[in-house]
Amino acid sequence: MYVVVSCPRCGELILANTSNKTRSCTNCGYRLDIRNQKPLAKAETPADAVEVMKKLKAMKAGGEEWKPNFNRLK
Ligand SMILES: [Zn+2]
């Protein structure tokens, strides 16, 4: 399973595999514990995860406030 989480320090969207415990932020390098983060979105496959990331980034770029709502991604 893959999850998209938001960096607690800088807000960057981070794609993480839930088989890993921690993930470093690609923007600020902050090491976050994946299991302590509330996922913004979930995906089963890497391809789905990439699609979800694209949508979230597009929304962020468009100034749309993201609220966790998994149904919206379908
Ligand atoms: Zn960060």
Image: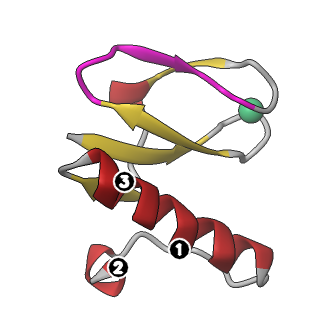
Q: CA distance from mark 3 to mark 2?
A: 11 Å
Residue at horizontal 67 percent and vertical 27 percent from the top: 25
70 lies above or below 38:
below
Residue at horizontal 44 percent and vertical 15 percent from the top: 22
Determine which residue is flagged by label 2.
73
Residue 55, numbered circle:
1
Q: Are marks 1 and 2 in contact (CB under 8 Å)?
A: yes
Tag 2's secondary structure?
A: helix
Q: Amino acid at mark 3?
A: Ala
Q: CA distance from mark 1 to mark 2?
A: 8 Å
Residue 49, numbered circle:
3
Tag 3's secondary structure?
A: helix
Which stretch did the figure color magenta?
18-26
Q: Amino acid at mark 2?
A: Leu
> Residue 41, percent across and down?
37, 59
Mark 2 crowdedness (10 Å alpha carbons): few <14, some 14-19, many ≥20: few
Mark 1 crowdedness (10 Å alpha carbons): few <14, some 14-19, many ≥20: few
Q: Are marks 3 and 2 in contact (CB under 8 Å)?
A: no
